[in-house]
């Protein structure tokens, strides 16, 4: 089997394990996903997946597609299990992210679509970062740590290395690291 296929499957495996931990923690009441974050992520991750496929991402795009699907499931769970701690700042993140979709629709270029979608994705992390700063136990540390493995294997699994295929996983691994650091620091205090 080709190395990129193995890495693509490994990235999908990391995502499935990560989300299994996340769902387990949601159902046990330990994790409260943020509705606004997942609403934005469903839109953005679907856009990025399409952009990666069009740009020739190959097996490296598989995990992004699986992530998009599992974010739809998580979004549905937000209505029952999600945080009720939604602030004006969260609403500003949501409005900003949704307004950022307009230039993406106007460009219709996979490169700019993914660049803008990755920027929106980073802003979407805002409500979750704010929530986690205030309630550091409200996110699944193990799930986020495993998710980092997804990006570490997804990147080398890409068939084509370009800004279009790389910017999203690089941005995501960076934002996930920020959230993990916040969880570790705030839990220690």
Image (tube, rainbow, N blue to C red):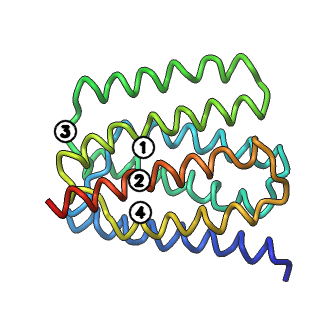
- Mark 1 or mark 3: name the one nearer the start of the chain: 1
**Which tag is nearer the camera, tag 1 or tag 2?**
1
Task: From the viewer's perspective, tell me whether residue 153 is left or right of residue 86.
Answer: right
Residue drawn where x is 40% and y is 51% of the image: 178
**Residue 144 numbered tag:** 4
SS for dot 4: helix
Q: Quadrant of residue 50?
A: top right
Residue drawn where x is 59% and y is 44% of the image: 45
Q: CA distance from mark 3 to mark 4?
A: 21 Å
Q: Quadrant of residue 9?
A: bottom right
- Mark 2 or mark 4: name the one nearer the start of the chain: 2
Residue 151 % position (x, y): 60, 61
Vertical placement of residue 176 versus 27, above or below = above
| Residue labelled with disc 2 | 74
Residues at circles 1 and 2 in contact by the CB criterion of under 8 Å: yes
| Residue labelled with disc 1 | 38
Q: CA distance from mark 4 to mark 1?
A: 15 Å
């Amino acid at each position: 089997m080709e190395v990129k296929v193995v890495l693509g499957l490994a990235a999908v495996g990391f995502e499935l394990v990560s989300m299994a931990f996340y769902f387990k923690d949601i159902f046990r009441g330990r994790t409260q996903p943020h509705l606004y974050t997942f609403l934005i992520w469903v839109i953005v991750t679907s856009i990025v997946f399409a952009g990666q496929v069009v740009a020739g991402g190959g097996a490296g795009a598989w995990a992004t597609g699986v992530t998009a699907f599992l974010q739809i499931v998580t979004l549905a769970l937000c209505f029952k299990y999600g945080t009720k701690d939604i602030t004006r700042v969260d609403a500003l993140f949501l409005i900003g992210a949704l307004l950022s979709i307009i230039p993406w629709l106007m460009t219709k270029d996979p490169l700019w679509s993914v660049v803008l979608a990755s920027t929106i994705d980073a802003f979407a992390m805002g409500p979750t970062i704010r929530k986690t700063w205030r309630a550091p136990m409200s996110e699944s540390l193990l799930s986020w740590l495993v998710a980092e493995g997804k990006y570490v294997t997804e990147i080398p699994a890409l068939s084509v290395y370009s800004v279009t295929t790389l910017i999203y996983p690089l941005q995501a691994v960076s934002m996930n690291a920020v959230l993990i650091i916040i969880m570790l620091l705030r839990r220690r205090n």
